[in-house]
Amino acid sequence: MTRPLRIAAGQGFWGDWPEAPYRQVTGGPVDYLMMDYLAEVTMSIMQKQKSRDPQLGYAKDFIPLMQRILPILAERKIKVTANAGGVNPRACAAAVAEAARGLGLQGKLKIGIVTGDDLLDRLDGLLARGHPLTNLDTGRPLRDVRDRVLSANAYLGAWPIVDALRQGADIVITGRVTDTGLTLAPLIQAFDWRPDDWDRMAAGTVAGHIIECGAQASGGNRLLDWQRVPDLANVGYPIVEAHADGSFEIVKHPGTGGRIDVPGVTEQLVYEMGDPAAYITPDCVADFTTIHLRQVRKDRVRVSGVRGKPATDRLKVSIAYAYGYKAVGTLVYAWPDALAKAEAADRILRQRLKDLQLSFEAMHTEFVGVDATHGPLARKARDARDVPEVQLRVGVRARDEAPVDRFTREIAPLILNGPPSVTGFAGGRPKPEEIVAYWPALLDKQVVTPVVEVITV
């Protein structure tokens, strides 16, 4: 392929703007629509859904989005890479196929399905064969929490997606692949990059990292000069315009809001970066210190010079496990003496919980409007004694549900038997929620085998 390849970001997380995919495929020419749905906690939520219904376990809102744009994709030959499959890519693919048939697209689309990342049913065998899945943060072996594990997924890279594309897939639906792999795979396919061409692997990884969070690279959630970002109501999501040599430009469709510039791209580059010289993925190790950014013209940033290093021999594994229970309760106090009232209510609540001899692993209080974001520094920077309103927000955590449930029953009485002028309690008393904790680990690549299927609609 000699012309630039255009890969458009359509979703940056599960729950992103529903209009973005449609605008990306109708706003101008693109070759691929990349849709990123998964985060660490997402997998456990989907696993719970699947346990209740074997046909669930994927991003259900992916289906109506696809139903809306499938005719456009077929007409314009736009391909899709999406990790919306969660813990049930086959069910997700079946739902997309059903939607396509309902639109009269039989025989016009092929769907690739990438699985093999889900390790939940293999955990005991892996542990027995000497893979301890040690927590990267604490050094504890997984056996310590094995009975509470809810989900376990290895991060696959770009190559299973490449395999599906080479088999003719128009839409590739995956489980837990890396966010960057959704963009790198089309580049490998289009330009026939070698697996050991580390600089190009790294360039494609950087391209994927820049657009994986959607509009965060085109003006959304921007720190610098955010007030001057134009027309965020009509924000244009970013597009990678890539060349065979590994260089690429970040652009957006003409006539859309937002902004593509070097500061904004730089902010996205440092998002979840870790060691800038060693951004590790299953496909390569990218050196972010080698990236060159240049503003070519308005809303066009050129990225070049990216260098890469050989991939490691292990995969990251994201494990979620049940930790306990939590609840958060809020009350809003109005002027005068809003902060004093909120502080008094907190003291009263804590005393009542102490009198009940309830045991919590943690209890945390914030005074929203005073110090919830910046803590004690905020109190030093302003006089909080005369703020017009303060939200008291108290959270508790415990291994057992009973003390958390009792905590939720002690919040509402403060409306009438605590300090005056409470408002904002229309939502009722809070409910205990299960805590899903995160367990990062590493696993030898050789024991994880991706599976690729391609079905015709």
Image (cartoon, rainbow, N blue to C red):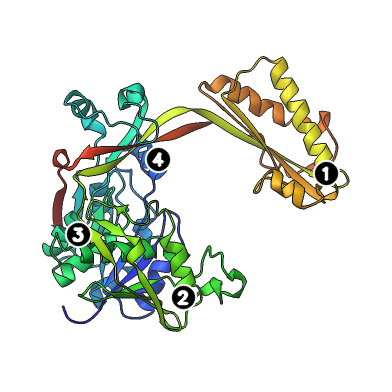
- Whether residues under marks 2 and 1 lie with C-beta atoms below 8 angstroms apart, the answer is no
Residue drawn at point x = 23 percent, y = 38 percent: 443
Counting residues from the start of the chain, the first of labels 4 and 2 encountered is 4
Q: CA distance from mark 4 to mark 2?
A: 36 Å
Residue position for label 3: 111
Counting residues from the start of the chain, the first of labels 4 and 1 encountered is 4
In this view, the residue in front, 268 or 349, is: 268
Residue position for label 4: 45
Q: Secondary structure at mark 2?
A: loop
Q: Secondary structure at mark 3?
A: strand
Counting residues from the start of the chain, the first of labels 2 and 1 encountered is 2
Residue position for label 1: 338
Q: Residues within 10 Å of mark 3 (few under 14, many from 20)?
A: many
Disc 3 marks a residue whose amino acid type is Ile
**Mark 4, mark 2: which one is toward the viewer?**
2
Residue position for label 2: 261
Q: Secondary structure at mark 1?
A: helix
- Whether residues under marks 4 and 1 lie with C-beta atoms below 8 angstroms apart, the answer is no
Disc 4 marks a residue whose amino acid type is Ile
In this view, the residue in front, 176 or 104, is: 176
